[in-house]
């Protein structure tokens, strides 16, 4: 049951991130029911897998843990992600990050270089771990290579881990003796 509620919370947070704000008349006696219905209309997982009671409990939990905020303004209640909820959606995005591999390689190498100070070792370790997960090849200690476009993903990671100023992204046509790289990635080899 805990896994189901965890998935429900992720779906609610993602839906609120996409939709922005839900507004419902403040005098509505069935605020939580209306909000649950609106969420189910916007999200297939919630529609197919959650009762309104489940949604109500999860919304109450998200409000208690300050992931969402409920405000009254101009005769309407609004529900939106809090700053804590916005950070959670970034974390979900980072956790789900995958590299896109097009059918054909464009012949460019993407090189990520970083020199991150010791005071930000958590960010350095997290970046290194994530680029390993994405399938990068370690050319040198803090030099990683990938054959496909990944600049947005690297920028997202660097911003999320607050190390953007210490990370460089390079696109290169050639790397000396790149036959080993081509074989590793299975590109440009016929």
Image (tube, grey):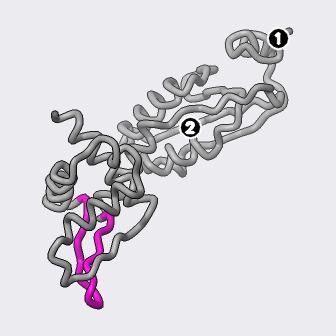
| Residue 65 image offset from top left, x and y in percent | 16, 56
- In the visual, does 113 lie left or right of 190? left
Dividing the image into 4 quarters, which one contains the N terminus?
top left
Give the number of the disc on residue 114.
2
Residue depicted at 72% across the width and 27% down the height: 147
Q: Main secondary structure of the magenta part?
A: strand
In the image, 177: left or right of 57? right
- Quarter of the C terminus within the rendering: top right
Q: Is residue 44 covered in magenta? A: no
Q: Which residues are magenta?
A: 67-81
Q: Is residue 71 left or right of residue 114?
A: left
> Is 116 in front, or is 147?
147
Q: Which residue is mark 1?
A: 189
Residue 178, by quadrant, is top right
Residue at left 57%, top 23%?
135
Question: 48 above or below 100?
Answer: below
Nearest to the observer: residue 114 or residue 58? 58
Going from N to C along the chain, the mark reached first, 1 or 2, is: 2
Q: Position of residue 149 (x, y in %)?
A: 70, 37
30 w.r.t. 9: above or below? below
Instruction: Tell us which disc is closer to us: 1 or 2.
Output: 1
**In the image, what residue occupies the spot 28% across and 58% down?**
84
Depth order, front residue of 36/159: 36
Residue 150 in picture, x, y percent from top left: 64, 38
Q: State yes or no: residue 74 in magenta.
A: yes
| Residue at 20 percent of width and 57 percent of height | 59
């Amino acid at each position: 049951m805990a896994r189901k509620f965890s998935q429900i919370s992720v779906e609610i947070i993602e839906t609120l991130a996409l939709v922005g704000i839900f507004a419902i008349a403040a005098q509505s006696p069935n605020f939580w029911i209306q909000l649950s219905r609106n969420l189910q209309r916007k999200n297939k997982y919630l529609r197919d897998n959650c009762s309104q009671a489940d949604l109500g409990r999860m919304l109450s939990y998200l409000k208690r843990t300050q992931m969402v905020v409920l405000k009254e303004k101009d005769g309407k209640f609004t529900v939106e992600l809090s700053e804590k909820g916005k950070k959670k959606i970034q974390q979900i995005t980072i956790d789900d990050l995958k590299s896109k591999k097009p059918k054909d390689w464009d012949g460019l190498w993407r090189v990520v270089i970083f020199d991150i100070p010791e005071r930000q070792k958590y960010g350095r370790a997290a970046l290194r771990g994530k680029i390993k997960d994405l399938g990068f090849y370690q050319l040198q200690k803090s030099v990683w290579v990938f054959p496909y476009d990944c600049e947005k993903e690297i920028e997202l990671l660097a911003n999320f881990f607050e190390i953007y100023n210490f990370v460089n992204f390079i696109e290169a046509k050639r790397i000396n003796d790149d036959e080993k790289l081509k074989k590793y990635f299975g590109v440009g080899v016929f």
